[in-house]
Amino acid sequence: MKVDLNSHFPHPVLSDDNDDFLSGNFDLQIPEVRESTDGNVEVDFHLSLASSDLQALIDNGSAHAGAFIRSQDTFFSELRAAGASLGTWHFQRGALNGRVEVKPVIWLTKPLENWSARSLNPEFGEAVSIRGSEIIGLANDIVFSIGQDKLRKFESIFELIPSDEIPKGRLKIDLLADAIRILAPVDLFKSIEQLRGTKGGKPLLLNAVYMPVVMEVLESIRGKGGSGFEDRPWYRVFSAKCEHLDIDIDGAPLLESAQRLLGSPLEKLGGAFAEVMDNA
């Protein structure tokens, strides 16, 4: 059973991406994910189906609605049915960790022979036959993060390094180390370290140093699989932060995303500048 929102099926599938059905809608939302102290995970779901034709199949046991749930870090992959429109899926300790992908689907539990539906697009004819276990409904993917990576302090994945090889007044980043290394010429490194020790220095550094660095990191990891950085320890934390804030790494605006990841540092800039000037 292949599940891909870009797939084209030889039979009708209820999806926002096609017109196989002239009316109807299928959606699944996850309003809350809870992690207990013992490592168990509870995932609340809200399923909505506005299709009398598909609802009838579910009611008579010919189909189920639910989702594929996959955790790449633990190799967990399971198809979970939703027994009602509202409910909770329970996962034991260790089943889910890191990035978790949820693919909402409606699938057949038995073959359909000469099935007719009022909302079916006429291009399929008056009736269709579909094999058992085939997908007949798709909704948009949902992604969330499990574990402590998203809770780690963001600054823990950055490391400021003095370098004699960087031109004066410039910065350079190195993404191949365990942390995101910010390379600075020695004089600039010393100035940054001094500014760190002042009361209003952190907001100034967030805007002047870390915000452009975060923007460059976002640009560098756009593309499939983090563009080769997915095995770096900093990438796990960085991607978990993005998932936790619902930031689309591949498509979200760089400046807006950087500001969200850094906690809107521009808000603190005015007060920080005043404090630095008072201490000058």
Image (tube, rainbow, N blue to C red):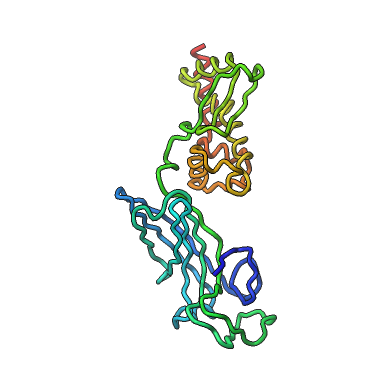
- In the image, residue 28 sits, relative to residue 109, either above or below, namely above
Judged from this view, the residue extending furthest toward the top is: 280
- In the image, residue 276 sits, relative to residue 120, either above or below, namely above
Q: Quadrant of residue 153?
A: top left
In this rendering, position of residue 76 left or right of residue 221:
left
Q: State the image coordinates of residue 229 (x, y, percent, origin top left).
A: 57, 41
Is residue 147 or residue 30 the one in the foreground?
147
Judged from this view, the residue extending furthest toward the left is: 38
- In the image, residue 155 sits, relative to residue 141, either above or below, namely above
Report the residue at 44% width, 58% height from top. 76
Report the residue at 48% width, 50% height from top. 99
Report the residue at 54% width, 39% height from top. 260
Q: State the image coordinates of residue 80 (x, y, percent, origin top left).
A: 43, 66
In this rendering, position of residue 109 left or right of residue 5:
left
Q: State the image coordinates of residue 13 (x, y, percent, origin top left).
A: 60, 73
How many tags in the picture?
Answer: 0
- In the image, residue 227 sits, relative to residue 202, either above or below, namely below
Residue 22 visible? The answer is: no
Q: State the image coordinates of residue 206 (x, y, percent, origin top left).
A: 54, 28
Image quarter (top left, top right, bottom left or bottom right) of the N terminus: bottom right
Q: Quadrant of residue 207?
A: top right
Report the residue at 46% width, 32% height from top. 156
Residue 260 visible? The answer is: yes
